[in-house]
Amino acid sequence: MSTRTYYDPLHQSISLNSSIPEEKMVMELIDSSPFQRLRRIKQLGPAHLTFHGAESSRFTHSLGVFHIARRAINHLSDFDSRLKEQKFILYGAALLHDIGHGPLSHTSEEIFKIKHESWTAKLINSSQEISKILNKYGKGNAKAISDLIRLRTAEKKLIVSLISSQLDCDRLDYLMRDSYTTGTRYGQLDIDRIISAMTIAPDGDLAIQPKGLMAVEHYLVIRNLMYRSVYNHRLNEVCNWLLEQIIKTARKIGPKKLWADKSMSEWLWNHEKMSLESFLSNDDIVTGYHIHKWQDCSYSKLSNLCRRFINRNLLKALNISSFTMETRLESLAKARILSEKNFIEPDISCGLREQIVKSYHPYKYGLRLWDGDKLQALEEVSPLVERLIQPNQSSWLIYPKEIENELKIEIEKLKTKHN
């Protein structure tokens, strides 16, 4: 028998015991090379350029998700002891749910046009190292876990909801962790109350007892605030836009003219047929190295973009969310004209970043309140949750600081014109 403890800033000690088969499986998965790769992928992508403490990794987050899932299933097993049979599937899915993330986490989905859920399922099924471990502890475990993540199917509905729903273990961990690492104070959710309020609805799916209503309302408000203050922060939007332009520009130059190693070449120019080996070979270090090298390439657009990013010489961003789409496009056109007038290349210095976020989706695996007698949708019980259904839209005009004064004058003219 061996034990292992990970000391976590949020959850304190996360202990594993090899005499417990499902925990021994988790220990082996943690030691696998695909999971260790997550140490080299930042949880919040380039957000460390905005919030200097945001250096946490997907490895740390994934351990946290497993820990919360273990707490949740141990609590829910008091209502249905048969849930204990699902621990191998739940633990595997909780730990591996992010194994398919590319460099800089969600940013890579935008810039490389991949879906991390698809790659997660592919790795669980096709990585011999991962599938061998999973199937050793139960025939067909790898397929069951990949189906849970990709298709949201499982023997027990509740297991799916703990991995992918409006109140899953992933969200519970990342809201607390991202708040902690960025130094914001919004993510102080009551995890103990939320877990203790979890129960099983008559249909076998997850529900919340009335005593947990306020804790869940608080959690949903926190999610809204974190999107507005961190995930969609103006400088974070600028950094993501810059990375998108870097990869787009590199792709246009092409494999015959631009240096890239074997794995990055596949990511850039053959991502639809990329091998598992090339996928796993890329991480924040490899992508960062390429961006660093491209600063000195002979293509001025790419080198200028890379220097901006590496040296944190960021572009400016103006919130134009209240404008109509027509006015937003006019604003972008003005920014491009002013950039050209100041001998600045508009293609790599002017852009729009549009985001729409819903804090709560009532029809996308929504939450229910179960008091032992009546099952109700959360938005039917809570006016606060009903209001959170309304989408938040953000629109940022990105432009070089050299044109800021002139641009603001032009924007005021546009506002006057359309009022």
Image (cartoon, helix red, strand yellow):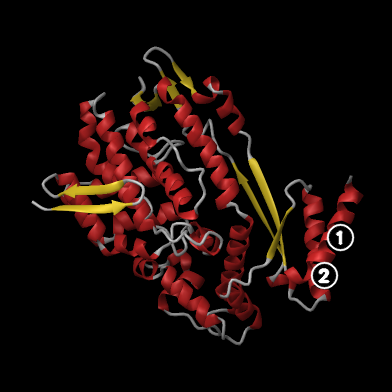
**Residue 283 picture quarter:** bottom left
**Residue 253 picture quarter:** bottom right
Distance between mark 2 and mark 1 Cα atoms: 10 Å
Q: Which of 66 and 316 is in front in this view?
A: 316
Q: Residue at x 44, y 57 (%)?
A: 43
Left or right: 216, with 20 as reference point: right
Q: Which residue is drawn at 30% across and 47% down?
A: 12
Left or right: 5, with 263 as reference point: left
Residue type (three-letter) at the residue carrying disc 2: Leu
Return the residue at label 1: 410
Q: Position of residue 156 (x, y in %)?
A: 30, 32
Return the residue at label 2: 338
Q: Position of residue 214 (x, y in %)?
A: 48, 27
- Local SS, label 1: helix
Q: Is residue 32 above or below residue 371?
A: below
Q: Is residue 383 above or below residue 7?
A: above
Q: Is residue 159 above or below residue 106?
A: above
Judge whether residue 135 can be spotted in this image. Answer: no
Q: Which residue is drawn at 42% across and 52% down?
A: 117
Judge whether residue 226 can be spotted in this image. Answer: yes
